Image (spheres, helix red, strand yellow):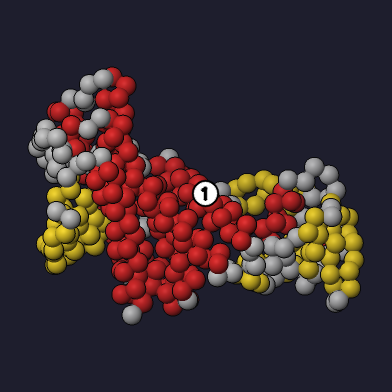
Amino acid sequence: MSWFVSLLVLCALIFFHELGHYIAARLMGVYVEVFSIGFGKRLATFKKFNTEWSISIIPLGGYVKMKGQDDGDPTKKSYDSDSYNVKTPLQKIFILVAGPLANFVLAFMLYFVIALGSPNVLSPVIGNVTKGSPAQMAGIQKNDTVLAINGKEIKTWSDMADIIASADSELKLKIKRDGFVEYKIITPKITQSKNIYGDIVYKKMIGIGSAGVFHKMELTPSNLFGYATKQTIFASSMIFTGLKKLVFGEVPAKELGGVISIVKLTSDATAAGWMSVLFFAALISVNLGVLNLLPIPALDGGHIMFNLYELVFKKEASEAVVVKLTIAGWVLLFGLMGLGIFNDINRLMG
């Protein structure tokens, strides 16, 4: 059941992406011939709104086939009034950007729903205290709860970590211990640690670890949009940074995952509860948005690149160049997909 749900989530995210393209194309007066979820042989199809809607056998993506646009053969063009080819570069860019934008909007909506459900958040309860650290020297102990720092109320572990990392001088911590309130003066020290990508970083710390205690985040109506916006921006920046590190070799290629990893992780999230599914779906949606903006021919970003060229130089890119770059883009794309699936199989086999 969990695998079925994961495939359903993936198809829903792909549908939303393609729906962005579809709506934008129709707004620009472009005839959409086919709207497909998946590639290859069609399993089901019907016609509505003068468009053929299909579900195909390979759930590795989807496509909206507009009149005059064919990634399989870029030389096939139409110059009818309802064709993609006769639209201005800005109109084409609007159609192309609408897909990734739909994924970001969907992620925002999912995070908003998560906020309504009061997501779990790490509490500022101290676990391990490093020997010889500023925290130990100040008398901080395991199971202490940080209530405030320099008079500012602390509600989450993240709030506390941000204040410590940006501290310019000593900090006055208000803590609760065994039902009593105490105050401790601590001066953070620049310490070596690792970030989420495994990079060695130096930042101000006091030498404490989390006790792993969670509580429900109660958000006011005015904070719901702020939470959804913050989470969407954080997920986007995390994925952009991860891609940059992959491109520059800072992250090994064996870390690249494919559709099998996505399905498995979504399946695991399903077993952990619907809140986890929503979190993971939002992250994948952002991932789809970011990946499709990459300047790779055959992806939205590649087409945007060609239209920016036309916008700047007032002429279309050479047809021969477009064909060669598109072929190269497909080779790169299928190569990355193949590598991701290869890595997935290796992980499943241990």
**Residue 283 visible in this rendered orientation of the protein:** no
Residue in the picture at 80% in, 64% down: 147
Depth check: give the residue in front, 215 or 188. 215
Residue in the picture at 77% in, 46% down: 167
Q: Is residue 267 left or right of residue 183?
A: left
Depth check: give the residue in front, 162 or 78. 78
Residue in the picture at 14% in, 67% down: 44
Q: Position of residue 93 (x, y in %)?
A: 31, 36
Outermost residue on the bottom side: it is: 1
Q: Quadrant of residue 209?
A: bottom right
Q: Is residue 217 left or right of residue 60?
A: right
Q: Position of residue 223 (x, y in %)?
A: 62, 57
At label 1, the amino acid type is: Ile
Residue in the picture at 90% in, 66% down: 182
Q: Which residue is the site of mark 1?
A: 233
Q: Quadrant of residue 71?
A: top left
All told, the count of numbered labels is: 1
Q: Quadrant of residue 56?
A: bottom left
Q: Position of residue 65 (x, y in %)?
A: 17, 48
Depth check: give the residue in front, 185 or 347. 185
Vertical side of 192 occupied by 302: above or below: above
Q: Secondary structure at mark 1?
A: helix
**Residue 8 visible in this rendered orientation of the protein:** yes
Crowding at dot 1, Cα within 10 Å, few <14 / some 14-19 / many 20+, comes out as some
